[in-house]
Every structure is written in structure tokens, then in C-alpha cells.
Amino acid sequence: MRIGVISDIHGNYVAMDAVMRAMGHVDMLWCLGDLVGYGPQPNECVARLRETVHRSLRGNHDLAALGLVPLNIFNREAAAAAEWTGQHLTAENRAFVESLPEQRVEMSKFTLVHGSPRDPVWEYLLDGRQAMANFPLFDTPLCLVGHSHIPLLFDETGKGGIVKGDFVLTHQSRRFTRLIVNPGSVGQPRDRNPKAAYMILTTFPLRLEWHRVAYDIPAVQRLFKEARLPNALAERLAVGV
Ligand code: ZN
């Protein structure tokens, strides 16, 4: 089975569309949360997911846009974007995001969380020490996380780190024990690579592919301007931070 894994779309529909085209046919599509928040096309993103996604979570920015967490815990630009998103989401799209869980287990093999097993919505799992603390907190061989917007890979010894560019991990190339992986962000990459990130997970034998795809960043930046969303959020897309 070929499964597309995406995360942190953040209302960037141009990036999402590029990812969906590059991905080609998948048997299932999983999304690790933060469908909206930051970007100018939250409704387009949620509507496309409602048609295509098989499993999705809601993340911290989704909660903010829904008004379920206070905005003062976010920085100024993120809070402004969350407020704007909350005002613009249609009732159907709002209901869909609201209905999403914060974690799930698939096929008894895959744990899906936005942040981490320890804190499914909020923890930024970024280093080996945090990974080691989280391994005892889930039961499956593989845990998929988003939230940090950085493509990552950790094994149970805490070894691993940032996955640069396109990368394939096969059953042969590494003795699979248990892994925590992050596909990276579709709509706002933060690893200084502005290309949209996604993952193809193939079962079984397990094979993980990290991919990057270029998209029309100036077109998205124009949409930020038209929506009067904070300029800093548009500018960061060009440098991948
Ligand atoms: Zn995010």
C-alpha cells in the first residue's frame, strides 16, 4: 500500500496542490495536522482534504483558528493569521477541522500525532534526547509527527536528525527497530529549503521516502498581500524559515 503523508499545510493551497500532483496516485492520504493558520487559502486546503484525506489530525494552529485556545500564546503574526482564518473558514470547513482527533493509531503499526506522543498537540520534537523520552510513550514500530516543520528521523537510541532533500529509507538500508519520523511541512518549511515537503510511506516491507517539490512562491505571496495577512509570513516562505 502506498500512503501519502503530509503535515503543516497552513492554508498554503498552491504548495498543497504541487504536493498532490507530485505525489501521484496513493492508496491513502494521511495528514498530521495544522491544515490552516498562516496562509491565505484555508478554505481551499480544507475542502481539498475533505475530498482526499483518509486520516487527519488537528494541530495547534487549527485549534487557534477555531478559537479553542487563547491567541496570546502565539506570536503576533501567528495570532493575527489565526484570527483571520477563524473569520474566513466556512461553516462546513470549520466543522470538519473541529471533528478531527489529536492522535490516532493506524493498522496497529503507525502512531500519528501532530506534536509528540508525550504532548500530541504542542511538543516540538526536534532532537534525539526528546525522541528517546518519547519512545516509551507509544506502542507501534513507527511514530509520525509534524509540528516542527522540519523533516526528521530518529531511532530508539536517539540517533538521527534532519533529513535533507529527497531521501529513501528501505527495509534493507537500515535495520528497522522503531522510528520517529517527520515528513516536513507542505506550506511553511523551516529547514532553509523553501520547497514543499511530503512523505511516501509504503507498506510492507516498510519503505519511507522524503520528497521536496518546488511551487510558485510569488503567487502565494501575492495572495498574502491581497488578504492583508502579515508580510513577514509571506516573506519567510522564500527562504524556508
Ligand atoms: Zn504547523
Image: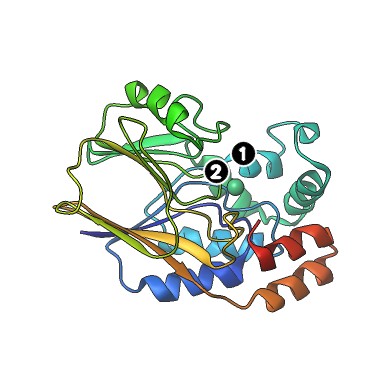
For residue 125, side relative to residue 26 (left or right): right
> Which corner quadrant of the image does residue 75 belong to?
top right
- Residue type (three-letter) at the residue carrying disc 1: Asn
- Going 48% across and 58% down the picture, which residue do you hit? 50
- Going 69% across and 72% down the picture, which residue do you hit? 220
The disc placed on residue 147 is 2
Tag 2, which secondary structure?
Answer: loop
- Image quadrant holding the C terminus, namely bottom right
| Residue 151: x %, y % from top left | 46, 52
Contact check, label 2 and label 1, Cβ < 8 Å: yes
Q: How many badges with numbers are in the image? A: 2
Q: Within 8 Å of ligand 1, the CB of disc 2?
A: yes
Q: How far is the residue under mark 2 from the one under mark 1?
A: 8 Å
- Residue type (three-letter) at the residue carrying disc 2: His
For residue 231, side relative to residue 135 (left or right): right
In this picture, is 215 found above or below 145?
below
In this picture, is 3 found above or below 223?
above
Instruction: Kindly tell me whether residue 209 is visible in this rendering.
Output: yes
Tag 1, which secondary structure?
Answer: helix
**Residue placed most toward the observer, 182 or 66:** 182
The disc placed on residue 60 is 1
For residue 235, side relative to residue 56 (left or right): right
- Image quadrant holding the N terminus, namely bottom left
- Going 37% across and 54% down the picture, which residue do you hit? 54
| Residue 189: x %, y % from top left | 58, 58
- Going 56% across and 47% down the picture, which residue do you hit? 97
Q: How is the image coloured?
A: rainbow
| Residue 155: x %, y % from top left | 31, 36
**Residue placed most toward the observer, 139 or 83:** 139
